[in-house]
Image (spheres, helix red, strand yellow):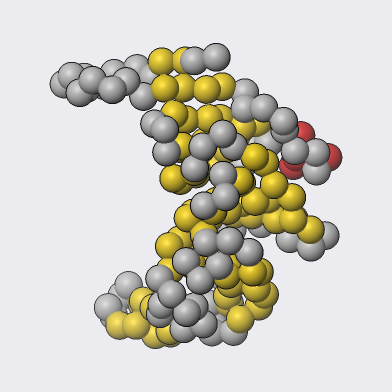
Amino acid sequence: NVLHLWDVETGTSDMTFDKHDDSVTSCAWFPDSERFVSGSIDKHIYLWSIHGSLVRQWKGSRVHDLAVSRSGKWMVSTSNEKKLHIYDLVNDTEEYISETESIISLCLSKHSDVLLVNLQNQKIHLWDLTRYAETRLLPKEPIQRYAIPKQPLSASLAPLFMTH
């Protein structure tokens, strides 16, 4: 429930953040490195200043994973609802993309234009977010779908197999 901000040079915890009522499941930095978000099983996402103040909060679903866009203008989270929640931090709005299965984790590309989503059924979906970044229009379908082979991988990396 408690987050610690550590000083890497001294090895000491300089700040604690203790607003969550249950296990914290994910954290993500903002590009300015002065703020971060934390998400929890308690169905809350908190935006923190590294100086200790709570900046903002959202209540919704149990948070599985979080990511903040490169611009810091929007954030995405996953929950147990088979949805990707997209938060527009400038206009204070929330939208969502529905998925076919429970979402285990997510990862934004370096430029925040593609979202990789790991599903519980061992499939991976790639979502093109370029239109969202420009127009705030969410995509309706993933741009690619991949299935992870059920056989053990050989010594070399096995390629992902595309499905339709």
Q: In which quarter of the view is residue 11 placed? A: bottom left
Which residue does the image show at 32% across and 20% down from the upper left?
Answer: 149
| Viewer-side residue, 17 vs 22 | 22
Question: Where does the image place residue 59, in percent across and percent down from the top left?
Answer: 64, 69
User: In the image shown, does 64 or 154 lie closer to the viewer?
Assistant: 64
Which residue is outermost to the left?
155
Q: Position of residue 49 (x, y in %)?
A: 58, 77
Q: Position of residue 107 (x, y in %)?
A: 50, 43
Left or right of 36 in this view: 129:
right
Judge whether 17 appears above or below 106 on screen. below
**Position of 108 compared to 149: left or right?**
right
Q: Residue at x 66, y 78 (%)?
A: 55
Query: At 36% from the left edge and 24% from the top edge, which residue is drawn?
Result: 148
**In front: 108, or 95?**
95
Q: Where in the figure is residue 159, as x and y percent of width and height?
A: 34, 17
Whether residue 33 is visible? no
Quarter of the image where the C terminus is located: top right
In screen coordinates, is 60 left or right of 51?
right
Which of the image's four quarters has the N terminus? bottom left
Q: Is residue 116 visible?
A: yes
* Residue 51 position (above or below residue 148): below
